[in-house]
Image: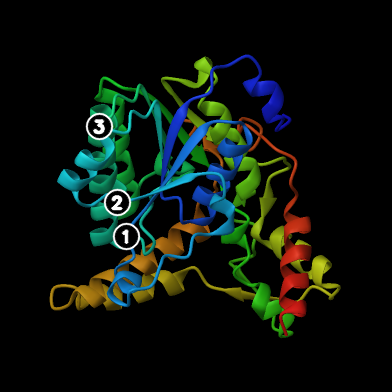
């Protein structure tokens, strides 16, 4: 499927749109796509306490050019509501997500901050709320997945129209081993590297897809899984692409899946004494989840992941992302 925004938005009324989580890589890309489409875009950023305390003006990312900047904390329901009410937004887009994946952060950001944002959107007269969720909530085992699902349920039961976008793996999330390859180290596989598959999508392609959701009526009231252009690839194939981009011969090392279980068991023993142990135990469970579960559409009848059934969108290729990433690393030295 092509990512032609001009065709998708042709003939539709431009809207007043607020993007929360606009400081993240995907949030910035969404703002850029919406501005390019001609919408009146507001980027919601959390107040920078460090800059305020030092008396410095905030540095606004260049990607937010063309958008109005609004500072507000999604965790402060009262202040957020008062900030939104006079704005008169038509659509609110949430790219909010807990960065750590810990149970505490998931409850605070993935659930409560989004609940506050939904209430503020309604107070501002918005008729559409677009949520950036994740495809991994199909088979929830982790705290952040349950938090996301709880908010999805809140959103679906609210009087406002909704669109829930569940992307597969991001290019950025598949780039963590680039530094290892540059240093001549092996690419780490979990098991044989064939346990999982995904259809990764770039920030730009995902942003185009979300921007289209703001104007396409058929995407309202829908939960939409979306991946990048196929075919689905395994972890080993990701490594092969990275080595190809680096111009190196593939060199792999296998890491046993049982490592995650052992780490979680040890850390869980200390969880009742310290939040630090609880968080680290959850990180071990997160690691195991992504090492064993595919980021593809789950067939509820068979319980299997289906690459064929996972929708595709966009044109960006993972190997091109790897080449650019490695080139930037080389030029930064």
Residue 290 sits above or below residue 35 on the image: below
Q: Quadrant of residue 269?
A: bottom left
> In this image, 53 relative to 3: left or right?
left
Can you tell which quarter of the image residue 296 is in? top right
Q: Residue at x 66, y 80 (%)?
A: 180
| Image coords of residue 197 (percent x, y) | 62, 50
Residue placed under numbered mark 3 in the picture = 154
Residue 188 x/y as whole percent: 62, 73
Q: Is residue 227 visible?
A: no
Q: Which mark is residue 47?
A: 1
- The secondary element bearing badge 2 is classed as loop
Q: Depth check: 259 or 13 in front?
A: 13
Residue 61 showing in the rendered view: yes
Say which residue label 2 marks: 72
The mark nearer the N terminus, 2 or 3, is 2
Residue 318 shown left or right of residue 212 in the figure:
right
């Amino acid at each position: 499927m092509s990512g032609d925004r001009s065709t998708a938005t042709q003939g539709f009324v431009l809207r007043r749109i607020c993007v929360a989580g606009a400081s993240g890589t995907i949030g910035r890309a969404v703002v850029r796509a919406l501005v390019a489409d001609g919408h009146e875009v507001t980027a919601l950023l959390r107040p920078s306490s460090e800059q305020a305390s030092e008396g410095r003006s905030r540095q606004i990312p260049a990607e937010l050019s063309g958008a109005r900047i609004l500072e507000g904390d999604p965790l402060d329901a009262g202040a957020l509501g008062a900030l939104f009410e006079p704005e008169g937004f038509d659509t609110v887009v949430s790219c909010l997500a807990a960065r750590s994946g810990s149970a505490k952060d998931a409850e605070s950001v993935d659930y409560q901050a989004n609940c506050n944002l939904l209430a503020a959107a309604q107070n501002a007269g918005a008729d559409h709320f677009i949520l950036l969720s994740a495809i991994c909530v199909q088979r929830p085992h982790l705290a952040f997945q349950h938090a996301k699902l709880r908010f999805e349920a809140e959103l679906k039961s609210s009087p406002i129209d909704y669109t829930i976008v569940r992307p597969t793996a991001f290019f950025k999330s598949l780039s963590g081993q680039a530094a290892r390859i540059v240093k001549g180290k092996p690419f780490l596989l979990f098991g044989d590297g064939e346990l999982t598959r995904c259809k990764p999508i770039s920030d730009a392609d995902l942003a185009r897809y979300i921007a289209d959701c703001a104007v396409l009526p058929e995407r309202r009231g829908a939960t939409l899984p979306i991946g990048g252009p196929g075919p689905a690839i395994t972890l080993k194939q990701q490594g092969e692409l990275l080595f190809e981009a680096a111009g190196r011969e593939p060199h792999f090392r296998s890491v046993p899946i049982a490592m995650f279980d052992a780490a979680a068991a040890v850390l869980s023993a200390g969880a009742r004494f310290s939040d630090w142990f609880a968080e680290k135990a959850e990180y071990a469970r997160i690691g195991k989840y992504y090492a064993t579960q595919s980021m593809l559409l789950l067939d509820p009848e068979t319980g299997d992941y289906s690459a064929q059934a996972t929708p595709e969108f966009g044109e960006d290729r993972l190997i091109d992302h790897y080449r650019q990433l490695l080139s930037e690393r080389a030029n930064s030295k």
